[in-house]
Amino acid sequence: MHAMSVRFIVIGVIILTFLLLDWYVYQGVKALVLSSSDATRKWVGIAYWGVTVVSMLMLLSFLLIGPQNLGTTARSFIIIFVFSNLFFKLTFTIVLLLEDISRLVRWLYALVANPAPSGEGTAIPRSQFIAALGMTLGAIPFVSMVYGVLVGAHDYKVRRVKIALKNLPKSFEGFKILQLSDIHSGSFTNPALVQKGIDMAIAQKADVIFFTGDLVNNVADEVGEYQKMFSKLTAPMGVYSVLGNHDYGDYVEWPTASAKRDNLDKLIGIHKKMGWDILMNEHRILKRGEDKIAVLGIENWGAKGRFPKYGKMKEAVKDLEPVSVKLLLSHDPSHWDAQVIPEYGDVDVMFAGHTHGMQFGVEVAGIKWSPVKYMYEQWGGLYQKGKQYLYVNRGFGYIGFPGRIGMPPEITVVELVRG
């Protein structure tokens, strides 16, 4: 079957599924206004189906035109509108479905036992109560998504961590590392809010800055005006960066292979123009007095799904002089378990990003959870196995959903101490 035909069939199935969902939820909405006037019921119906039509048109434009061909603002607005509407109705549907199943069970029981009627004379009919409950619960994800976009997307948090290394040279005691990851500049729409995060990072006065990949979503030009802003990030011992999976342009169609390569070369050039020392399977030596530590940086290397393995650790450690401590910048945290631990036991700390904490989760009162944990064992924060450490930054920016819920954008400050 022709690829275009398959695409339209898939789009048709998606639209039909959404319409069936809307029809089912509408039955609950009607129950809520059952005792209202005819005019009220009429306008509720118009409003409900009006939102549905707008949502469908937005979804069609997203699917037919393609997200990469929509402007950042338009793409973000569509995602917010469609998905907040969808999550509201999915939650509502779950409540209604549970009630319908309950009704079916009671009806089947009545056929056998013929029990006396119950629930008569209540202040509100059961159907209306269930609909109201569904509406209330459905509003929770809707409000959360709106908050995540308007506030959570740029609610930057500084996370401070100390890592004790027995082999840390004395002159590097208290060495302060600032880590940023997953900027995704192509998703930003408000430079002033981004500047707030950059100012917070600068205020940490770190000795060195690490950036662990995904400067853009797909193409180098997305950096745009943010290039000048991020070039303000400086540190006494330099800014070191690596590439993430999104930086290679693997998720868009290019007219030629050379066009794709030119885009990558342009992005690498942007790193350099910003004063970032981009490590392409290389290492650098940091010195304090007579003491030395090494910073290794590799291209993206992922052990999950179809993420590419461009990174070459053998090249990164080639001709590396003896040093007390090795710090590795590698975008994907799955690299740690898959290659670093079994083959490179002398890497003391690896710095990664990639997961974003799925931009959704709970980290409060000792609870740490995000759906991304079911794909990545190490998805946010500090991890240790034996003498080796991994820190996974939850990301500075966002992609897909233009916000964050319970998983704020992160600025990490890691202090190395002698342990």
Image: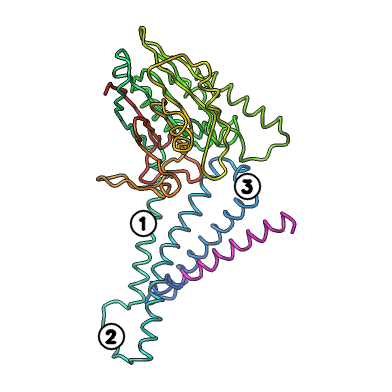
Tag 2 near tag 3, CB within 8 Å: no
Three-letter amino acid code at the position of disc 3: Gly
Q: Between disc 2 and disc 1, whose residue precedes? A: 2
Quarter holding the N terminus is: bottom right
Image point (36%, 56%), residue name: 140
Q: Between disc 1 and disc 3, whose residue precedes? A: 3
Q: Nearer the viewer, residue 248 or 229?
A: 248
Does any portion of residue 1 appear in the rendered image?
yes
Circle 1 SS class: helix
Quarter holding the C terminus is: top left
Residue 75 position in % (x across, y down): 55, 45
From mark 2 to mark 1, how far is it between C-alphas? 31 Å
Q: Quadrant of residue 323?
A: top left
Tag 1 near tag 3, CB within 8 Å: no
Q: Which residue is mark 2?
A: 118
Q: Nearer the viewer, residue 84 or 101?
A: 101
Three-letter amino acid code at the position of disc 1: Ile
Q: Which residue is mark 3?
A: 66
Q: Where is 155 relative to 117, above or below?
A: above
Q: Which residues are magenta?
A: 1-26
> Alpha-carbon neighbours of circle 3 within 10 Å: few (<14), some, or many (≥20)?
few
**Residue 140, disc:** 1
Three-letter amino acid code at the position of disc 2: Ser
Q: Where is 284 relative to 48, above or below?
A: above
